[in-house]
């Protein structure tokens, strides 16, 4: 990633509160790099997504290369390199959920929100115009006994039906 690209981005810095958390995280590990995942989670929470400027800031703090940060961001599906909605809705599509009508839940969400499912290379097509929701398909969320399930940000919702989905969205 060239410096030229980074300079075109809005600069990023942790706010005071998050910087304290990062310092505390770094202090827990023998090497700074080990704090990469929680630091990136904090960065994504503050910035909304992991832009090149965010990667540069995290790399500087953890004393690693920007490419190393990029590798981690690219590897884990919970990190986004483009803007996403305030609420990221992940619909499990693996077999146990598929056998319990997750497609009905997904189709209901698509219709209700008026969007398609986001893909790794096109998050915008699965994001509402007001920037409120992003809809994604994911693999097993480790809650097969209560299928079908979705996650909205960090919260799991189980045994879903279209009616339950409406209730959950109304309460967000
Ligand atoms: S298959 Fe959906 S939670 Fe496991």
Image (cartoon, rainbow, N blue to C red):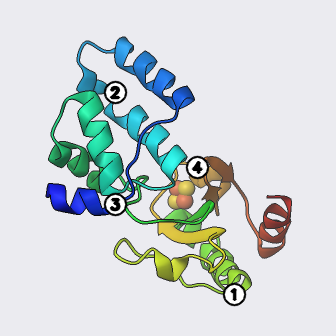
Callout 4 secondary element? loop
Precedes in sequence: disc 4 or disc 3: 3
Q: Quadrant of the C terminus?
A: bottom right
Q: Residues within 10 Å of mark 4 (few under 14, many from 20)?
A: some
Q: Residues within 10 Å of mark 2 (few under 14, many from 20)?
A: many
Q: Quadrant of the N terminus?
A: bottom left
The residue to which callout 3 is attached is 9
Callout 3 secondary element? loop
Mark yes or no: residue 115 visible: yes
User: How far across and down, in percent of the image, does residue 99 sit?
Assistant: 58, 71
Decide: is 132 above or below 11. below
Query: Horizontally, is 67 left or right of 8 in the view?
Result: left
The residue to which callout 1 is attached is 111
The residue to which callout 2 is attached is 35
Precedes in sequence: disc 1 or disc 2: 2
Q: Residue at x 51, y 54 (%)?
A: 48
Q: Is mark 1 within 8 Å of ligand 1?
A: no
Q: Residues within 10 Å of mark 1 (few under 14, many from 20)?
A: few
User: How far across and down, in percent of the image, does residue 35 sit?
Assistant: 34, 27
The residue to which callout 4 is attached is 143
Q: Residue at x 66, y 68 (%)?
A: 132
């Amino acid at each position: 990633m060239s410096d030229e690209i980074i300079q075109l981005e809005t600069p990023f810095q942790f706010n005071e509160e998050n910087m304290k958390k990062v310092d505390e995280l770094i202090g827990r590990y023998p090497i700074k790099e080990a704090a990469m995942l929680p630091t990136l989670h904090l960065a994504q929470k503050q910035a909304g997504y992991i832009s090149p400027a965010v990667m540069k800031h995290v790399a500087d703090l953890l004393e690693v290369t920007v490419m190393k940060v990029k590798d981690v961001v690219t590897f884990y599906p919970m990190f986004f390199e483009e803007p996403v909605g305030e609420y990221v809705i992940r619909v499990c599509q693996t077999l146990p959920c598929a056998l319990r009508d997750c497609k009905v839940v997904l189709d209901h969400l698509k219709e209700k929100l008026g969007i398609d499912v986001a893909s790794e290379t096109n998050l915008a097509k699965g994001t509402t115009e007001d920037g409120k929701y992003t809809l994604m398909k994911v693999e097993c969320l480790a809650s097969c006994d209560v299928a079908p399930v979705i996650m909205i940000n960090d919260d799991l919702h189980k045994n879903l039906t279209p009616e339950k989905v409406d209730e959950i969205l109304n309460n967000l």
